Amino acid sequence: MFTRRRIIRLLTIPAAAVAALIVWLIEVPVLGIELEAMTGAGSPMTVGAVVAAGVAGFAAVPAWLVLAAFEKWTRHPGRWFVITAAAFLVVSLAGPLGGTSPAAVAGLAALHIVTAVTITGGLLGSRTVGPVGDVGAAGDAAATPAEGAVAYGDGR
């Protein structure tokens, strides 16, 4: 069954890809930044639109799994997810440091930051909605917890 929560989480995947694509379209065609980074082999690699969007969309999938694990096994999943997402962002920012120019470093870092913010915001935003059809007295979908929900702080 598709709940509102699951739909929002599914939509986070293409949202991350679209956000990265928008940033790429501003940086490369509009600003003229050449997004190149040195690879481990020592040769430069150009980051194209498909790579930027694809990697951003792909990154949302393991993030979703991490959030789901925190929701299942921790008392404060939102807090742990934000801490983990911030740590992953900091580590991922080492990649842009291999940019071939200061503009490339800044452009690649912007791609990483926009992707992280989109994924984190989308997944955390999904925590505040309830399942489809679960409407409380005031008409709010998340007004009452689902019957039998475990008190893990996961918004159910």
Image: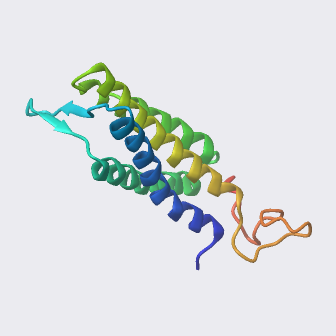
User: Which picture quadrant has residue 82?
Assistant: top right
The one nearer the camera, 11 or 48, is 48
Q: Residue at the location (64% across, 52% down)?
A: 125
Residue 56 is left or right of residue 79, and the answer is left
Residue lying farthest to the top in this orientation: 102
What is the x, y in percent for residue 134? 77, 73
Q: Residue at the location (9% across, 29% down)?
A: 42
Q: Residue at the location (86% across, 69% down)?
A: 136
Residue 25 is left or right of residue 141, and the answer is left
The one nearer the camera, 104 or 63, is 104
What is the x, y in percent for residue 32? 32, 32
| Visible residue check, residue 134 | yes
Residue lying farthest to the bottom in this orientation: 1
What is the x, y in percent for residue 113? 46, 35
| Visible residue check, residue 151 | no
Indicate the quadrant containing the N terminus: top left, top right, bottom left or bottom right.
bottom right
Indicate the quadrant containing the C terminus: top left, top right, bottom left or bottom right.
bottom right
**How many callouts does the rendering have?**
0
Residue 74 is left or right of residue 95, and the answer is right
Residue 95 is left or right of residue 15, and the answer is left
What is the x, y in percent for residue 97? 29, 24
Q: Residue at the location (87% across, 69% down)?
A: 139
Q: Is residue 60 above or below residue 135?
A: above
The one nearer the camera, 39 or 20, is 20
User: Which picture quadrant has residue 141?
Assistant: bottom right
Q: Is residue 49 above or below residue 110?
A: below
Q: How is the image coloured?
A: rainbow
